[in-house]
Image (cartoon, rainbow, N blue to C red):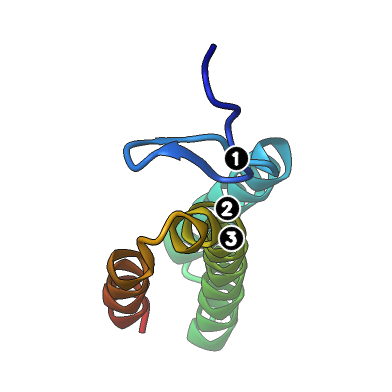
Amino acid sequence: MTEPQHDCCHTPKSVVQPDKTALLKRLARLEGQVRGIAGMIEGDRYCVDVLTQIAAARSALDAVAQQLLENHLKGCVARAVNEGNSDEAIAEVMALLKKMR
């Protein structure tokens, strides 16, 4: 009998995202935003307008990252702590947070 998959991760290299559909929808909208920004540049739009859209796209990407991080903390990290592997899990999260700055 296999162990049930947790909220986020089954193994360190295989994940089960609880919000997969919502995350994919957000990323699809973000992809459209980025194409829109390219169109704005192609169309010689005012720099401030382009930069405003870039800021909005960054914010949207950050929101996806925050959701993934929350899923990871509630699933993988919580499981690691319960299994006595908290030092490794905390080190992984700290390295990740440094990358996300």
Q: Are marks 3 and 2 in contact (CB under 8 Å)?
A: no
Q: Nearer the viewer, residue 60 or 40?
A: 60
Quarter holding the C terminus? bottom left
Does residue 35 lie above or below 61 as drawn?
Answer: above
Q: Secondary structure at mark 1?
A: loop
- Quadrant in the rendering for residue 59: bottom right
Question: Mark 1 or 3 closer to N-term?
Answer: 1
- At x 44% / y 65%, what residue is drawn? 41
| The N terminus: image quadrant | top right
- Residue 89 drawn at (x, y percent): 36, 65
Q: Quadrant of residue 5?
A: top right
Among the two numbered marks 3 and 2 on one chain, the one whose residue lies closer to the N terminus: 3
The answer to whether 87 appears left or right of 24 in the picture is left
Q: Nearer the viewer, mark 1 or mark 3?
A: 1
Task: Name the amino acid type tagged 1.
Answer: His
User: Is the residue under label 2 in contact with that under label 1 (CB below 8 Å)?
Assistant: yes
Nearest-to-viewer mark from 3 and 2: 2
Q: Identify which amino acid the numbered label 2 is placed on.
A: Gly
Residue carrying label 3: 64
Q: Which mark is residue 75?
A: 2
- Residue at figure coordinates x 50%, y 82% from the top left: 51
For mark 2, give the secondary structure. Answer: helix
CA distance for labels 1 and 2 = 6 Å
Q: Amino acid at mark 3?
A: Val
Task: Name the residue located 59 percent from the left edge and 48 percent from the top edge.
Answer: 27
Q: Which residue is mark 1?
A: 6
Percent across and percent down for residue 62 are 54, 71
